[in-house]
Amino acid sequence: MTSALRSALSRRRFLTSTGVALLIAPAVSNGYARTITGLPWEPNAGDYPKPVVPGGWVFFTGDEGVAVEAIVDRLIPHDDLSVGGKEAGCAVYIDRQLAGSFGDSSWLYMRPPFAKGTPSQGMQSPVVPAQRFRTSLAALDSYCKQTYSGKGFAALGADQQDDLLKGLEAGKVQLPNVDGKAFFDLVLQSTMEGFFADPLYGGNKDMVSWKMIGFPGARYDYRDHISKHNQPYPNPPVSITGRADWSVRS
Amino acid sequence: MKRLIRYTLVALALGSSAAYAGDDQSFTAIQKGRDLAILGDCAACHTAPGGQAYAGGLELQTPFGIIASSNITPDRETGIGAWSDEQFYNALHNGTTPHGSHLYPAMPYPAYTKLTREDTDAIHAYLQTLQPVNKSVVTNRLPFPFNIRADMAVWNALNFTEGTFKPDPQKSPEWNRGAYIVEGLGHCGTCHTPKNVMGGDKNSAHLEGASLQGWFAPNITNDQRLGIGSWSEDDLVQYLKTGSNARTIASGPMAEEIEKSSARWTDADLKAVAVYLKDLKPAHPGDNAQPIAADDKRMTAGAAIYKDRCAGCHQDSGKGGAKLFPALAGSAIVQQPDATTLMRVVLQGSQGAGTSGAPTHPAMPSFSHTLNDDQVASVLTYIRNSWGNAASAVAGGDVKSLRKNSPGG
């Protein structure tokens, strides 16, 4: 979506225009009654997500990137079911999300007051995710260096990393000036998104998670298969951008 | 006094009966003219987008340059309000204006020459009842040398056969009515007959399909594979009346023709056209094409794309769904020698015709964002050569140039 369109749909403007429409609608509705013939349609319509461009970090600093790669590799460790979170591209996914409209909350209503919400209401804070990641990763780094004699998170052993993450999740580890549990929840959520979202967003490399769970990917409908009971679905997963078989290999 | 009244009554009676017999401003003539104007779809070309009906100004892209349609409302200054029936007849029959200059055959007088004088008079009578619109249109926007109207005298000598339609006594009145519509007022060949280098009809390939304005108007002869040979008369009537039938849905310029014109024809005229088209033998039968082998690399790539992106609606079998998703298997439009329409529909998407008989307006999404040129070519090569279909492969380069030339593509 373009930024112009986004701002045209800002909540305030929507409410204003709706209010005005409600006020004047009864006055003009008779005069404007009309039959709409046909349906609006235009060629090349579509609002497709732009595929992530591979390469270096866009949001993270080098140290931040290394730490996040270490975290996602403990949340989704490499095992006999799949590759780990780092190899699947979860850190790349998080980096690109933080550099975009998720990172700066530009798609959210971000005006005060910020009352304390219920758990189901999500984040209620003026601190946007990009800022939250930056301060939390800095706090995590200083906590690690203080606690583990100068080592950053990535330099810790796997067991130490797991213990620390479990401590954050349980609210037992207190990071300086940062809500450690809120940070853990945010990283866990983002890592799962990166692992299972369409590969065009930077994670789920080669549709690894979809192959693991048997999800057929971005398909439209299954009428050709719906009556074939107790037979495995035969088609491999497909991304929004397609799959390798789509190209003529020479 | 009594005598005066009697004279007046006689005069009135004479006057009104004269009006009924000879004056073409009678209701019956006007009504007939209106129906004929719909049959010929005059408004389609003589109306600019968003402009007043019949006031002209639509730009027609021809291979020679732009020609804009003229104002045919009865405005005396800028329209045809000052034209006599005779002058109107000459424009349609000979392609000449009252000033003696030549029309360009973007105005399909090579087809309209077949109209009877009675019908051109009726159309003229109807046009005279329209609200005059004072709007002058520069019709000739062609580059040199095509902008010289006198060129058309030469063109006519080579490409134009003047002559009112002559019924074939061997055929039924219904067949003859169909022929009169298809070859004359309906001017089907204007789009569906291929053109020679001068833009004249290639009569040796009558109604065998032609490309224009970024679309390919398919073969509409009775050819089994490339034409309407496998359609019944009812299929044709339903298609022309509603825009869709069990096999296909009209899109592009044909959807517009159906919505504005043939959806409003009488059932008798629709039937007559179907009878005539079903009797039209192709000069070049298209039954000897061999499909490309299924293990060709373009075919296997196309099959993968088809399965992932197309089969949801058009089904693995290519049979689609009646009145909602056009069948690709056995489709004539899919197997035309020229794949322009197919490339265009996949790139831009398409909205099918919507009429009171089939108001759904089913639409296909655009794939220009998710398929690259070679992928579009592969999937089209696949649908053109599967389920019994057979046609030439589509090249990625053709997709590329169409994408470059289509707005927003």
Image (cartoon, coloured by chain):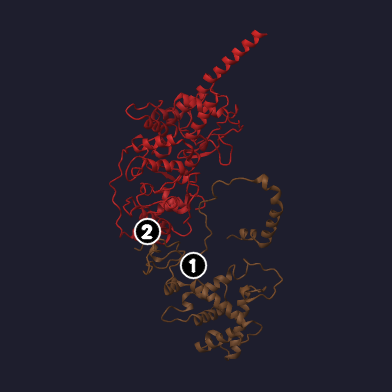
Chain colours: A brown, B red
Q: Residues within 10 Å of mark 2 (few under 14, many from 20)?
A: some
Location of residue B125 with respect to A201 vertically, above or below: above
Is residue A152 something that shows in the picture? no
Which label lies toward us, 2 or 1? 2
Q: Mark 2: which amino acid?
A: Asp
Q: Position of residue B200 (x, y in %)?
A: 40, 34
Is residue B251 something that shows in the picture? yes
Residue at 32% over, 46% down: B225
Q: Position of residue B196 (x, y in %)?
A: 38, 37
Q: Position of residue B27 (x, y in %)?
A: 55, 26
Location of residue B246 with respect to A148 vertically, above or below: above
Residue B309 lies left or right of residue B226; in this view the side is: right
Query: How many numbered circles are shown?
Result: 2
The outermost residue toward the front is B2
For mark 2, name the chain.
B
Q: Nearer the viewer, residue B96 or B306?
A: B306
Q: Are marks 2 and 1 in contact (CB under 8 Å)?
A: no
Q: Secondary structure at mark 2?
A: loop
Which residue is label 2 attached to?
B316
In space, the residues marked 2 and 1 are separated at their CA atoms by: 26 Å
Q: Mark 1: which amino acid?
A: Leu
Q: Secondary structure at mark 1?
A: helix
Which residue is label 1 attached to?
A200
- Give residue A145's mark: none
For mark 1, name the chain.
A
Residue at 35% over, 58% down: B298
Q: Nearer the viewer, residue B146 or B275?
A: B275
Residue A16 lies left or right of residue A1; in this view the side is: right
Q: Nearer the viewer, residue B402 or B143?
A: B402
